[in-house]
Image (cartoon, rainbow, N blue to C red):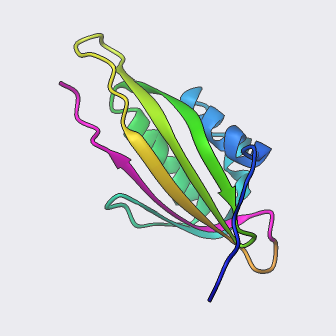
Amino acid sequence: MQLVFTKREPPQWLLDMWKEIDDKTFGKGFDCFTPDAICNLGVADWKGREAIRANLKAFIDTGFTARHYVTEYWDGGGLKIFRGIVDMTPDDGAGSTIHPTMTHFFYMDEADATKVRHWIGAVGPTSFG
């Protein structure tokens, strides 16, 4: 298999998803996922859009605020690649902000190319010092 990737500006669906996480609202920005989407974020293995939403909310609710920044976005048709940085600041002020790097692969749904069916990502390190 061979894919050609084009570097582009990040699409609105991706920016909307990160905004939902950054704003801690977890709303319509998650509509970019198919109802049965799979997410493998680090060691996570979440099945279904609602499980992805709920588990990310539970993670953010552990006491920090995130701000996601896009460094690169590559469009390969059915596969999108995102690289960026996330600022993670403890809500209680008991630690300094950390800035882990992120790499994410978004496999788009074959029936609806506007929806993500599988998200594989890595973020880290994520421990506060």
Tell me the quarter of the image containing the C terminus.
top left
Q: Quadrant of the N terminus?
A: bottom right
Write the start and end of the magenta stretch as one range: 113-129
Residue at position x 72%, y 45% in the image? 10
Image position of 85 (left or right of 43): right
The percent coordinates of residue 98 (x first, y second) are 32, 26
Is residue 37 shown above or below 64? below
Q: Residue 104: percent from the left, percent from the top?
A: 51, 56
**Vertical arrangement, residue 37 with respect to residue 82, above or below:** below
Q: Residue at x 61, y 32 (%)?
A: 25
Question: Is residue 32 or residue 121 the one in the foreground?
Answer: 121
Seen as rendered, the residue at the extreme bottom is 1
Q: Residue at x 37, y 61 (%)?
A: 44
- Left or right: where does residue 114 sit relative to residue 66? right
Where in the figure is residue 45, as x and y percent of width and height? 40, 67
Residue at the (61%, 38%) spot, across then down:
18
Q: In the displayed structure, does residue 28 sit left or right of residue 101?
A: right
Q: In the orientation shown, which residue stands out farthest toward the left?
A: 129
Where, by quadrant of the figure, is residue 124 drawn? top left
Residue 47 position (above or below residue 126): below
On whether residue 115 falls in the magenta region, the answer is yes
**Which of the two residues, 5 or 67, is positioned nearer the viewer here?**
5
Q: Position of residue 63 (x, y in %)?
A: 34, 26
